[in-house]
Amino acid sequence: MSNQVKEQAKTEDEDRGFKRGTPNTVLHIDDVHKSFAGLHALSDVDLDVREGETHAIIGPNGAGKSTLLNVCVGRLKPDRGAVVFDGNVLTGKSPHQINQLGVARVFQTPEVFPELTVLENVMVPALSKRDGHFRLNPFSSFSGEKALRDEAKHVLESVGLQAQFDDLASSQSRGDKRRLELAMGLIQHPRLLLLDEPTAGMARHDTNATIDLLKKIKEGGMTKVIIEHDMHVVFSLADRISVLAGGRIIAQGTPEEIKNNPRVKEAYLGEEQV
Amino acid sequence: MTSSWKDWALLIGFSAVILCLPILLEPIGANYPDLLQKIAIFGLFAIGFNILFGLTGYLSFGHAAFIGIGSYMAMWSYKLLTMNVLPAIIFSTAIAGLLAFAIGYVSLRRSGIYFSILTLAFAQMMYNLAYSVLTPLTNGETGLQTRAIRSDPNQSLLDGDIRVIDQAFGVEEIGVPTTNFFGMAMSGYTGFYFCAVILILGFFIAQRITHSNFGMMLKAIKSNQNRLNYTGINTRPYLITAFVISGMYAGLAGGLMTATDPIAGAERMQWTASGEVVLMTILGGVGTLVGPVLGAGLIKYAEQKVSSWNEGIIADFFSFLPDGLRDFMAEISSLFVGEGWHMTLGLMFMIIVIFLPGGLMEGFRRLSVLFRRPKNRETMKSATIPSTKPGESIAPRAAE
């Protein structure tokens, strides 16, 4: 079924004449504009994310980083331009369709299911991955999903939440909620994982643990886009960095290139001094 | 998991209690078939309502419409086909499901208060239509009733019924036609047991839905619908399905109302009936399996019994007190019984919402924690105390 959808989307793209990125591009952001009441949040944003890389998007507050992410996952519709993921135009698709194509998002403020247990929180996205966006199965037993439960436990162990499977998500600390959300993204084995400040609000040792975890996933070949303020995190994880300022991409390159880029220093590093 | 034997234990326990209701309710004088039937039927209605409200959090104020259409459908089945209740309730359920799909499809475009208002508007529309445009189908204020069979084809349906199936099988009718279940007359305790068996069946289905993957998605919708969308779930079809299922429960309940007393009037569709099921669910415990039935039982008991108590009964109750005090107490209490039974209901509702937002089921849970605590204090520390914090229990977790 998903193949059929892909085929259809492909012909749609070609009809509309969308540009494609290089062959190993997974996410291609093509000339995206977005303005809110006259304020240009994003203008002329072009960005290619390559297969398997960790791509960090940095920039001062209000640079448009979160807007860009929201455009990618279908929360916002760009005024112009398109986002193409793996041959599918994401622009105009609803969030659940985008997720089903293999894009998972980890939110900045933890978005979990507060009234469900930690384990259930991870099993819900696992079910979504396995059964698709809707499946009428009112008589299948949730407690009988042994394989999914084991997988969910495994993923929760990998993020360090093995002690609280049956606790309610609402009773978790903020840091644990963030880890839980990461697990909710990871269990879907997305082709592209979008992380919105995954370590914000975490203590130092938790941040390091998260970096280690994200490094481990990198070895697994998952493509990741990370928005992050913490330069320590950015430079330990990113393969390439894009710098967003005033709604435009002012620089793009490897961490080394970015560190030495005078425009970046002026716009960003100069102010914050890392 | 070990939850499956718990499910079976709950189901068996529930069935036993429901089937023994005539004995269990004897001490409080509620063991007469009419009240028992009402408890079973409204229990079923509340169970279905809870699948929508308890699991997804979408509060419908228009479920009376499904009760109404269920009743009318069953009546037409009696009038046109047969006095057997089985086809009648099948039609009730099916047509209510179709109507629920139509109403749900439109109403579920909105959530929260707007959803509630939309459902209320649809129900009121149905209610008014039944009195006006649809009078040929509903018989307006008189209500739809069964009549004797007219053999003259020109006369039939004008002032009589045809009941083609009954006629084909040559069923004899003497006087006012009565409903039956393959020959068993649906009156008295037979009627109650018929409703009770369907209630148990409905409970079983609700239990399976609650503990299914589908039910988990519904709970996730209640918990954080936005997040669920970003998790790849299209929540709309889930919501529509839940709405249709709960509408079908209501339609079935509406059909059952006619099973023992074959008459249907539009007053069943009034908004107060929609409000009543909300009260039942909240009183018993939103999101729990047993709660809605408990709430339905309590409200129907209050409606039938408390409303019939008079000052004499009250004075007897307080007869152990000295004269002056007895009169005073009787005076005060009499405000809450008889015609004032709504005061009792309102007071009960307020006390529960303020002190036990999880309904009676939360009360039982707290009691059981209280009794269990001394035994294994060590293990209880972190496990149960957070879940019984009053502030957090507005939306209790679905029954285990």
Image (cartoon, rainbow, N blue to C red):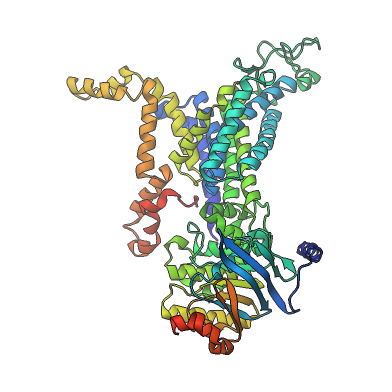
Camera-nearest residue between A14 and B12 = A14
Q: Residue at x 52, y 39 (%)?
A: B16
Quadrant hosting residue A213: bottom right
- Give the image quarter of residue A56: bottom right
Indicate the quadrant where residue A19 lies: bottom right
Left or right: residue B281 compared with residue A46: left
Q: Nearer the viewer, residue B390 or A242?
A: A242
Q: Is residue B286 above or below residue B250?
A: below
* Quadrant of the snapshot with the N terminus of chain A: bottom right
Q: Which residue appears at 48% of the width and 52% of the height?
A: B397
Q: Compared with residue B364, is residue B305 higher up or lower down, i.e. above or below?
A: above
Q: Position of residue B68 (x, y in %)?
A: 61, 28
Nearest the eye: B93 or B312 = B93
Q: Is residue A92 visible?
A: yes
Q: Nearer the viewer, residue B159 or A147?
A: B159
Task: Give x and y (percent) for residue B353.
Answer: 39, 41
